[in-house]
Amino acid sequence: MEQYKQDFINFMVEANVLKFGDFTLKSGRKSPFFMNAGAYVTGSQLRKLGEYYARAIHDHYGLDFDVLFGPAYKGIPLSVATTMAISELYGVDIRYCSNRKEIKDHGDTGILLGSSIKDGDRVVIIEDVTTSGKSIEETFPILKAQGNIEIKGLMVSLNRMERGKGEKSALEEITELYGIPANAIVSMADVVECLYNKECGGKVVIDDTIKSAIDAYYEQYGAK
């Protein structure tokens, strides 16, 4: 595993973004882990987060694209932080764009904020985590309505590796449904490999009990 991926996993835990215990998800599933990107709240955290995304996007898609699109709401700071990181790390200027939940009819009108998207633009979508693909379902038509664009792929921070609407993972379902690559900075398999019976922030985060709960969760909900 690349060093930046190990660093990112430790960063998620230390920022209290990735937690382990007993959680009830929106889907109703009882999960032994939970990720909340809304817990990134400081300037230094957002700067580091943007750098991790930038490295992963560079690894998976290169930097030969024009716009980084972050669906509202959590995708807005992600797209801003990551375009800044791409500029700092690689010297490449990528435009950022996000959508509004409600169309604005005065001033800076329309459904988009940030850069406009035009014919010929190549776009990468950035999100925190995808469990059902609902956000892509909402934003894909918005992007396609902007003209003849190429969507190069989706990047999320964590692949939960659990079933989406069917037997495959949400990321695999997105690839099948929309014909675009979908990748994550790290997967839960990476997280377990990195943290199981190892210290993070002075304590063992995934001990035998948590590991057993994760294994049982994937027995029931793991993608096939």
Image: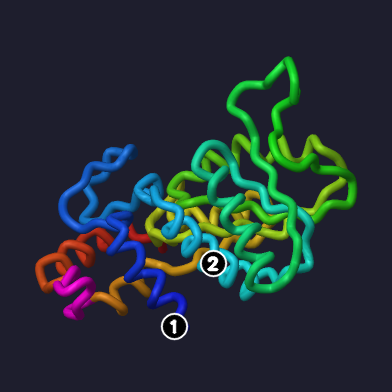
The alpha-carbon separation of the residues under discs 1 and 2 comes to: 13 Å
Who's the residue at 74% across and 25% down the image? 108
User: Is residue 198 placed above or below 161 in the rendered structure?
Assistant: below
Q: Is residue 198 magenta?
A: yes
Residue sitting farthest toward the left: 209
Give the mark count.
2
The secondary structure that dominates the magenta segment is loop
Q: Which residue is labeled 1 in the image?
A: 3
Task: Give the magenta-colored segment's residue range.
Answer: 196-206
Tell me if 113 is positioned left or right of 72 in this view. Answer: right
Who's the residue at 40% across and 54% down the image? 163
Q: Nearer the viewer, residue 114 or 43?
A: 43
Query: Element under label 1?
Result: helix
Who's the residue at 39% across and 59% down the image? 160
Q: Classify residue 115 by image quadrant.
A: top right
Residue sitting farthest toward the front: 43
Who's the residue at 68% across and 56% down the image? 124
Where residue 190 appears, as percent x and y from the top left, is 37, 74
Residue 82 numbered mark, or none: none
Other residues around mark 2 within 10 Å, as few (<14) / some (14–19) / many (≥20)? many
Tell me if 160 is positioned left or right of 93 in this view. Answer: left
> What quarter of the picture does the C terminus occupy?
bottom left
Comes first in the chain, label 1 or label 2: 1
Where residue 15 appears, as percent x and y from the top left, is 31, 58
Q: Nearer the viewer, residue 35 or 26?
A: 35
Tell me if 81 is positioned left or right of 187 in this view. Answer: right
User: Is residue 19 placed above or below 70 in the rendered structure?
Assistant: below
Q: Which residue is labeled 2 in the image?
A: 51
